[in-house]
Image: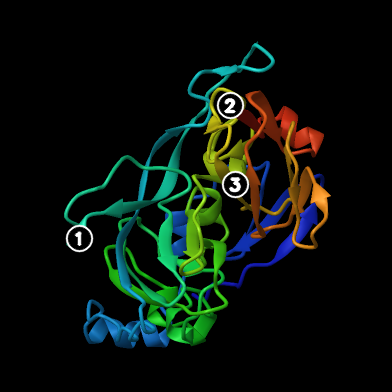
Amino acid sequence: MNLDRRAFLGAGAGAFVCTLAGQQIASDGPEPDLEKLSAGIEVPPKVRASARQNPLTPAQTPTPAPGGTRREYWIVATKARWNIVPTKRDEMMNKKITGSTKFTGWFYREYTENFGAPKGPVSMPGPVLEAETGDTLVVNFRNDLKIPVTMHPHGVQYTPEMDGAYKGQFTDPGGFVQPGKTFQYVWDCKEGTEGVWPYHDHGPMDPMPLYKGLFGFINVRKKGAPRPDVDHYLVFHQITTATSGLARGFQCINGRAYTGNTPTLRAKVGQRVAQHITAMDVNFHTYHLHGHRWKNAAGKVVDNETLGPADSLTVEFTEDNPGRWFYHCHVFSHLHEGMSGWYIVEP
């Protein structure tokens, strides 16, 4: 049976409907059985051909630019129990959050070389993939989930074979990494790719794996440029009932909701601070940081910027204002459903 390619329709205030294997899934509906739905997906021809050969043969790695480095990562797609509101409180409002807040999230988890051992606990977002212009990123990816998933990068340079995207019958093996299989992605961080970019699942069941937590950051720094003293990474996203199977949805930052649960950012006066934000759902969000300003891409001084789905934003400033500050999405319905956090600046 062929999978009907996803279609998106607006549905209410920020809700989404996607069609997977002919089944419409709404953000406020029940959690679908993705394993059952994925069983109806036809394995694309090039993926079948690769499986008959050797799917673990490393891709040909381009030679890094002069002075560049080959930077290699070992990433596993896995699942684990995750608590969206571990304190069960909204610290700012001193309000108790009732009901279940635990669900089975999906994660990109970094391992030591050759998938030896996890480097740390699961996290949402996944590991930051670091590089400089002129480097080559080599990402060895293993799928420990029970449906096909992928890693698709934004911003960097790559061939179609390294896109990590499902394209129906034209799909390359990296766009359909089957359960238990491994694929090596090779991405070129050439001049002009500098910036902080998202990566995420773009396989045949998207967007559901992404909404369950399969996303992360790539930070390509300009070679030789001064580095900030502090980097903060934030993903604004919604965890819905269809994503989690919970009785209600949450507006999250890095998989958590409400102050005291979302990341508490920290810096000191005099430090150069870079805050990197992306949005990973179907909504538009804004990033607002109290008591601070920065110059946007047009050179205008602002304290609030808008992000659409998969947009990325970097805010940079030299810290000069000590205290406990509030950061949040200025879409008030998102703020009041959990999309806020603390920024603490020490003198």
- Residue pointed to by mark 3: 275
Which amino acid is tagged 2?
Ile
Give the x, y percent position of residue 91. 61, 17
Give the label on residue 344, or none. 2
Residue 149 visible, this orientation: no
> What is the spatial separation of the Cα atoms under label 2 and label 3, in whole angstroms?
13 Å
Which amino acid is tagged 1?
Glu
Q: Is residue 303 above or below residue 138?
A: above
- How many marks are shown on the rendered structure? 3
Label 3 vs 1, first from the N-terminus: 1
Question: SS at mark 3?
Answer: strand
Give the x, y percent position of residue 282. 70, 54
> What is the spatial separation of the Cα atoms under label 3 and label 1, in whole angstroms?
29 Å
The mark lying in front, picked from 3 and 1, is: 3
Which amino acid is tagged 3?
Gln
Give the label on residue 268, or none. none
Give the x, y percent position of residue 315. 66, 50
- Residue pointed to by mark 1: 113
